[in-house]
Amino acid sequence: MHIVVFEVAGQRYAVPLAIVREIFLATAVQPLLEGPAVVEGLVDVRGSVTPVVSLRRRLGLERNERDLASHFIRVNLDGRSLLLRTDRVVDVVEIDPADLTDVVALVPRLDHLAGAAQLPDGLTVICDIGAFLSEAESLAVDELLREAGAIPGNG
């Protein structure tokens, strides 16, 4: 399995390469007045309004000032595009899924993490992006996107 390794607050995280559509330098985010706290705002990516998920908020980390070197990782999950703000993207590496440690078994409140892998340069935590938004947060994001005219529906 190939993963995209990135850093947030000095810790290494990763997502499966299979869900990554692109990586690019972070741009200005249109903040939301309402909506889930984990959603930082919206960004227009080539005509498509896309929510930005704050990894720092989801992981309970301190907010940081926007760094010009921060990156967005655009992932596609169940037909929805999301942008993940990272401090920096490090590498794409291959790991053996059999080598993953189940972090949820160790710390049950971390159900948005799929596991951890020991890489040559340290421990990397694999994110379960499908679990990053709760059902309520996901519905709230859909409603915000409808209001923004990004997806069809009443609004």
Image (cartoon, helix red, strand yellow):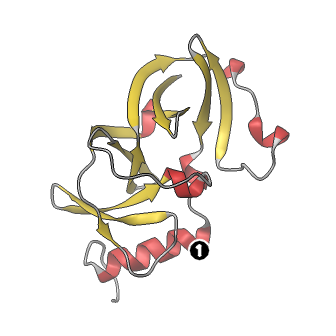
Extreme-bottom residue of the structure: 155
- What residue type is disc 1 on? Ala
- When the figure is inspected, residue 117 is found, relative to residue 87, above or below; the finding is above
Q: Is residue 155 left or right of residue 112?
A: left
Q: Position of residue 59 (x, y in %)?
A: 61, 51
- When the figure is inspected, residue 79 is found, relative to residue 18, above or below; the finding is below
Q: Residues within 10 Å of mark 1 (few under 14, many from 20)?
A: few
Residue 46 falls in image quadrant:
bottom left
Number of callouts in the render? 1
Please report the residue visible at 51 percent of the width from the left and 51 percent of the height from the top: 55
Please report the residue visible at 55 percent of the width from the left and 70 percent of the height from the top: 137
Image quadrant for the C terminus? bottom left
Q: Closer to the camera, 27 or 83?
A: 27
- When the figure is inspected, residue 91 is found, relative to residue 27, above or below; the finding is above
Extreme-front residue of the structure: 65
Extreme-top residue of the structure: 120
Element class at badge 1? helix
Q: Is residue 33 left or right of residue 122?
A: left
Q: Is residue 56 left or right of residue 49?
A: right
Q: Position of residue 138 (x, y in %)?
A: 52, 68
Q: Position of residue 124 (x, y in %)?
A: 60, 27
Q: Is residue 62 visible?
A: yes
Q: Closer to the camera, 41 or 104?
A: 41
Q: Position of residue 27 (x, y in %)?
A: 23, 52
Residue linked to disc 1: 136
Please report the residue visible at 41 percent of the width from the left and 22 percent of the height from the top: 91
